[in-house]
Amino acid sequence: MESILQNLNGMAELLAVARIEYVSHWDPETVQRAFQWATYFEHLHGRFRTNTRIRKALADRLLSINESLRNTFELYRELSFEDLGHCRGVLLASLLSNPALPKTLSDTLFARLRPCCCDTTGQRDQSDLNHLIGIARLKAASKVLSHALKLNGSTATNPYPLLLDPETETKREMLLKSLETWMQCPSAGPRDKLVDSLFAQLQQHEINNRSDFSKVVAAVLLAKQTSTESGAVDLALKWLLSNRCQLQTFCHRVPCALLSELAHRYPSFRCAYLEFLTTWARSMEYDFSCGDWRHGSSPELNWKELVDRFMYLLEGPTLVKEATETALCALKADDGDFEVWGISVWTDLLIALKKM
Amino acid sequence: MAQQSTIPAFCLEYWQNKAVEWGQATTLASQQDVCLHLQQLKDFLQQIFQKLQYMNTTVAIKTFPLVGQLLGRLCWNPCVVADEESQRTLLQCLWCLYSAEPQNAIELKANDWIQSLIRHLISDSETENNSFIQILGYTSEEYHSNVVKCMVSSLVTELRESCCNGIRMPKRFTPDRLHSLSVFCIPLVTCSEAAPLIEALLTCCESGSGEALSADFLKAVGTALLQKKIRLQETVIIGLWLRYLPSLENVTLHLIETVVSIPHFSPQEMESLINDSLLPKASARHPHIFMIVDTIFRNILLESDGNLLVQTLMQIFTRSFIQALLFGEAQDKPPLKAFFPHNPQPLLMALLKHPSDVPSQVWPQHLLCIVETLKVAVEDKDNGGSQRGLFENWFLLVHCGDWVDIAAQQLIASKAETSEALLWLLAFYHHPNNENQQRTKLLAVARKVCGHLKVLFSSTTLSLSHLQTSLDLAEANSEESGSKYLFNQLFLNFFLFSAGGQVIAKDAVHLMTHGNLLNGISAMLAGAEYRLNSYGLMDYKAHRTLKLLQEHLKFKA
């Protein structure tokens, strides 16, 4: 048993390496051996699938392997016991989608996959192909269904802003699941570090590639509170509020309606959000030539957006509305309590908001 | 030399144009068009694959210069890729164009192009999804599977809300939208994650003005069910049959084909196949379904000239059907009359009781009752359309053919008065129509044979010569298969149940095979065994004789 667990370690490392650049050092024999190992684990899976004790032992070991390898490899793909059941397919998919795979190796792999070959190994090859077909099929199915959902008619203007599209909802669920798993980590220190580093990665990726990580985080924070989830959600909130830069990016990328809902739900967020808006407003300068408030360095932080955001807050639930009003009035008073346009940003905000 | 392709150029060109027209299926119209043509496309791809299998890449490209373009375009069409079968065939075609050892520039280029296509299919080209999932450590399969489930559940919720509230609410799902949605589901019929959506569509009430769902969709579901690629609840399946007749017909024909192609006659296997098909249950709840299934059985029976397998199929089906009727849920069970409108009630009551539900001591009386009611029904000239009445009652008898077998079993040991009735029953079974006096003639011969056998019944020392007269008589009158069958039944029952039959059984059967008297004797033996087992008759002697004969025949074959 111990040797099997050791080998499991090796297999996981093998699969991890298959996804990174190191694979450019592999040669045909390595590939061959890798597939032999994969076959061995598929066989193990078949044997112990119904044996609860051994299955649990293997699954538990995989959990700890995932934890350790996650720190070593970037873009690590977590392994589960079910994955062992189609290990060869997993290996194949990892290799084929790895851009660093040398051409000679990819040629060998493709030739190996020939589905119409009827030799004794023909039977086995089909299962690799089945795995690939399964992946492609699901991808295509989600596209087809997204077309079907568009039949709704209501497309661009979402009448209910908190309604999530399926992609965001799925990402939310997956993120929640990860958070819940990490919550099981006994010590808070390494766990927070992990969350920090991963979320930072994700946000950086979002900035580079215009993805929707912030929206997903917002979705997580708006998830229905159940006893297990509350811990996970708090983790996300903690990360969000721990760093001003993160918060700024978040507030810029998430739609106003969701932000005001968040402000309603989390008092800590409300304070932080108001602070964010206040800072933004303070950094605006009045441009006399066109009679408008502008931001010194970033033209996209425009007046209209600022007003819109305050608007959403004022149209929100009572608590939020009152807090916002109080804050604005206090700031106006501090600034001299002017009623004339163009002198204090707070005055102008209140004027603009009253007009709407 | 390039082979002469038998696929007309028109077809390849047609699909080429179609693929260009569809593009990547970004508009509603093109998506719907793809889904509607999916089955034909699958057939075409299969044809192309058959051709490409035996060509190497260079030859293939010479023969079908545009095939690469076609395959490539199809790979980028999600409606084609989502269907498992079409994707598989597509990939198989692609691999035919892949050369393990490329010989020239064309083959090298083809290899590269195929590799890039495969990569596109399995990995996420959109970097955003890719990295989010990867950073968290999930796989793209998991992500897409969850997205599909999420989309399915939101569609299902919408469908459930808007269909059949009981109150007439403005439905968000107009018949048009339902139709379009059902077309979208055609490639997803075999996708297990989409099964709740398929079920929701099928259970959605009709808007009242005709069928809202697309016929192609219903056909695709029917086919997937037959190939066991999808699992649906029983009520949903029966609902499908009720609203789309061809699916019911296909299931029935498929059942018949499967049953007829079982290598050895096995009533047990037949029974399980019939029950698995869900037809008895469905027929018990809906007389409409029963009528259609029964009509198909009847036609096959007549076309096959009374094939024994079809007869047994009808008998076993009827038994399962009656059981489903008796033991099914009690919500408005249709009366027997709804299923058998042309048969008189007393006859129905007599025949539809299965022999295993009647104690064996009561069999002679019950048989007499059957014969009397049957005679009345058949000879009742006042019943309008007497020819029709005759056939309807004969068909009913065929459904309940177990009683005819019991009659044959009881005949030889029976008393004189009963024998006459039983003989009439057997003769009627094989010749319902007495236009040319065939029945009367058969009756006469059978009476004689039976008479001879009766005399020999209790004799313990028998030899083949004793049987000679009966055998000759039988052989002389066996031009028709019906008569042959009757005599075989008489002789078989004689061997099994008479005192001295066991001894001469082997030799007699040997003689009968030579004289071409035997017709499907192993089937008959299997039937007899099944009956002995299911009626719990503890007749060890009969069992032993049966085993002996079966061994003998196996040895011969």
Image: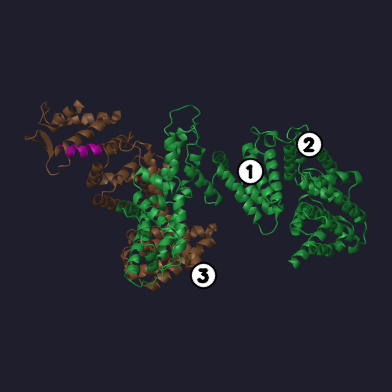
Chain colours: A brown, B green
Give how far apart the Cα atoms at labels 2 and 3 are: 65 Å
Closer to the camera in the image, B231 or A235: B231
**Residues flagged by tags 2 and 1 on a common chain:** yes
Q: Quadrant of the C terminus of chain A?
A: top left
Q: Nearer the viewer, residue A222 or B274?
A: B274
Amino acid at pointer 1: Val
Instruction: Identify which amino acid the numbered label 2 is placed on.
Output: Ala
Residue at image mark 2: B377
Q: Are marks 2 and 3 on the same chain?
A: no
The numbered disc on residue A120 is: 3
Q: Is residue B453 one of those drawn in magenta?
A: no
Magenta stretch?
Answer: A271-281
Q: Are marks 1 and 3 on the same chain?
A: no
Report the front residue among B263 and B379. Answer: B379
Circle 1 SS class = helix
B525 lies left or right of B287: right
Disc 1 packing (10 Å; few <14; some 14–19; many ≥20): some
Within 10 Å of disc 2 (Cα), the crowding (few <14, some 14-19, many 20+) is: many
Does dot 3 land on a helix, a strand or a loop?
loop
Can residue B23 be seen in the rendering of this structure? no
Disc 1: which residue: B293
Question: How far is mark 2 from mark 1, CA to CA?
Answer: 24 Å
Q: Position of residue B445 (x, y in %)?
A: 86, 51
Residue B3 percent coordinates (x, y): 43, 67
| Amino acid under disc 3 | Thr
